[in-house]
Amino acid sequence: MFNGKLLNGAGALTLSYSNNTFNNTEFENVFSENYGGSISLKYTYTTIIDIVMFKNVTSLESGHTFTITSDNFYNTTTYVYNITQIGDQNRLIRNSIEGTFFSTYGNNILSIENYYGTDISTGTVMSFDGDVKAVLKNITMENIYIKDEGSLIRTTNKLINGANISFDFLNVNNIYHENYGYDSTLVHSNGSKIKFNNSTFTNIEGTHIGLVYQENEAVILMNFVDILNFYSLHSHPVFNINNNDFFTETSFFGFSLSLKNVFQDGVLFLINSCYVELYHTEIDNIHYCHENNECSLLKEEIDDNSEAALIEFNGVVDLTTFSMLIKFNYCLLNKIYGLIGFKVKPGMTEISNSMITNSYFKYGLMYFSNEWESQFSIITINTVIFKNNTSYRGTLLYYNDVKSGAPTMISIYNSQFIDNTATNYGGLIYSNGRNDESLGIYITDCIFENNKALLGNICYSYDILHEPFFSNSDPSNNINLRSDKNNFVTNPTRLLFDNYNTDDTLEIYSGDRIDQEYSCTIYDDYKNTFKIDSSINELKLDNLIFYEISLIGVRDKSIRTKVTGSYKGFCINNQCKFKDLRLIANPGEYILQLEIVSFGHYYEFKQNKISLNVIIKECNNNTYINQDKYGVNIKACYLPACEPICMNNGNCVTDNLCDCSNTKFTGKDCTERYKLKRNQFLNISLITISISSIIYTFIIMLFLFYYKNHEIVKAGSYDFLNLILIGLICNFIYILLLTKYNFSDIQCTIIAYLKNLGFSLIFGSIITKSYRVFFIFKAIKTINVKYIILSKYGFLISYVLIQSTLALIEHLTHSSKLIVINDENEKEFEVCVYNKIQVTSSVLNVIAIIIGTCFAYGIRKINKKFKEPLSVPIYIFLSYILLNSVVEKINGNNYTLIYYFNSIGLIISSHFILYFLYIRKFIDIHYEKKNHVRRSNIFMITSTWLNNKAKDNLATPSNVRTNRLSEVVTYKVKGEEEQLSYAEQN
């Protein structure tokens, strides 16, 4: 007996080549850097350990409590009873070791009965190296911490037959396994045989873990074993049975095995070259991470170890022995979640006398894809209840035909399929098998109740030829199955018209539009309508069936044609509809063909075309136009069509082009009116005359200024002569504005004001002058100087102010409006419309003309030598007003005539004023200079008498009486001297 570091001994005792007995012993706080934290048995004979307490004992190499070491030629027998082990709760030992309970090396015999351990760490709990034989009973462990590569039970280094270990009543609770790569937490077996009876494992948690890994012909038997609550953060196989070479003995056998509450998404059984048999096994709540959509939290890529929920075959099958087999007999599989249950790969799967319930497999319990190696596989399902399961497609079987050449045999007998639902197609079976081989699926004497799918409550297949074979010993059962049209549905296989008889022929001209809506429906091999998606809001672009329509020659398919309009579209609500097509082709026989060009998430079917018979008729050139209307190098035969139609008796000469020559209108559809055009020559003439008139009016102003001190100019009143010239300029500007075609509201006000202002300045001045002459010659009264000043300017100023006030009110109240009206020839033009304010101005002007006419008539007999010719302009303007009114009355809608008469009349009357009031004066002045005769002598008396008389009048203006026939009065008003001469020669 020895210990110590130098002798490689245990922490307390090291025994060799001896028989040993330990009773009622306690090891506490024992530490060893070598094998055996407390006891190391090396090549001992028989050792009995009974009622021993191990508390906080540690080995840095192997076996916290004890280590047994021997070789293949030496048998060491050890009996251990009533052991208690209490480890370190703080997990201070960070190194992972072999045997945190014990370790054994060599060909040993070990028996342990009645063990309790807690807070055991860190590493493999029970380590078996070599061909050990061990029996362990009544083992209880809890709170186990495993780090890195380690397991609860680990066997290594098979020498001949490997370890043979039996556990009875092994109860383990709370295992946490922390590692950074895959490892199995319960068992890691290399070539050993391990049997579990009446055992329980609960609350197993880790990061990268499974439960069992076995290799090298290892065998595990689990009888009456419960495994509850298994959680792995990452997805890995739960039972990884990896025998590289075929082993005829069953590698994994479970009887009354219960596996419940597995969180992670790894496959349950990963099988390679071995047999797996499960009897009376319950597998419940597997991959429940799917319930709360937590399986994809780590965003791991789906691989073979996580895609399948139940079984994954991994390896090559020996067809002579079927080296991979898994059996489920009298098993309950409940609430299993995953993309698929298992892949139909080379190997054998048997499920009999079992129940599969309340599970979800997105692509079915069985998923077949011939993308793998072409090897034979057999699946047998016999007397199985398949109930209340759901999937996206095919709750029982999803047959995905990728390529041909992978035979399989699936046989289903005497089974019940109840209340299963696929949210898409195939309530039980979905198959897109479409290659030469038959599916090899046989379903015999089965019961189907209340299975549901969008299409194919029982089966959805590519076509009838690739449908599973259903048979029943009772023919009435087959009839009942077929009675519901949605029980068996195939992929779309054909198109049929809904509203067209294939014997009918559509006769049209080239370029005609087909306005009638045609529809065709998609049918399957059972002549059922093919339902796609009922709501357009739920459609997805990838799921749409698209079609394309073309026009094909019957005798020459290469002949050039063109289809325009809605010749491309998609089908919805099981129908493909089309209309509004324009067919362009040379005369002949054609077919209008609809072809499915994109099948969405459905598979291509051969009868994906449907056609109408079409004849393109010869064009009647007498009635129709035959030309390349649409720019496709094919002539179209058509009647010209105008949209909108030609109005007002316009003639449609070609598409959307109207001939309006015989109407009073113009524009694309003969609805636009012509703009009223004036005679261009007259309009330019008016503009030229107006501008010229303005220019020589300014020239007259200059001459008037030059001769302002001449007696003739003084006699005509220089101020009034200038005001009349300003009024004339307003008239000419008014005429210039009238020559415009377009106006605005403010321009309308300005035009009216210019006309009234010109009238006010001209005729206000003329009326004032006429009145003064009339006053002097006809009235006998006392002359008051203030009254003379007031009578000279008062009327004119008042009249101008009134007209200006009215114009301002008109502008502020927006009374002037520009409107567009039509003449008798439906030509439109713009006119200004005025309200009662402008009427008031016109009434005032009329009153002024009447007053002026009266004064003109009153001074008509005055000797021409003693007065200006004021009557003539008034008579001329009065005539212009009267004639203009007559023209407007007779030709009320002939606005061009009214415009010309108004403009020309105003020009004539204005030039009469220029002539009589100015040009004649300048002519008189010219002749006066030439003859050296002063015309003003007829108005003048001697200057002495004039001055004296003027002084007397200014001194006593209220008492002055004048004789109209013999006296001359000279007076000053506001610094201006004006001479009035009254004389009459005998």
Image (tube, helix red, strand yellow):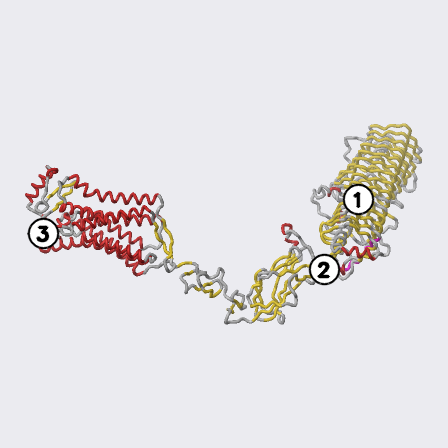
- The magenta segment is 403-413
Q: Which residue is mark 2?
A: 527
**Residue 306 visible in rendering:** no
Q: Nearer the viewer, mark 1 or mark 2?
A: 2
Q: Nearer the viewer, residue 968 or 538?
A: 968
Q: Quadrant of residue 469?
A: bottom right
Residue 891: x, y in percent? 32, 58
Read off the residue under disc 3: 934
Give how far across and how far down residue 758 sits, in percent: 25, 49
Earlier along the polypeptide chain: callout 2 or callout 3? 2
Which residue bears the numbered disc 1? 334
Looking at the rendered image, the quarter that the N terminus falls into is: top right
Question: Where's residue 613, x and y in %?
Answer: 63, 67
Pick the front one: 969 or 83: 969
Residue type, label 3: Arg
**Residue 408 belongs to magenta span:** yes
Of the image marks 1 and 2, the number of the one nearer the N terminus: 1
On screen, residue 575 above or below 713: below
Q: Nearer the viewer, residue 271 or 338?
A: 338
Q: How many neighbours does mark 1 have within 10 angstroms: few (below 14), some (14-19), or many (20 or more)?
A: many
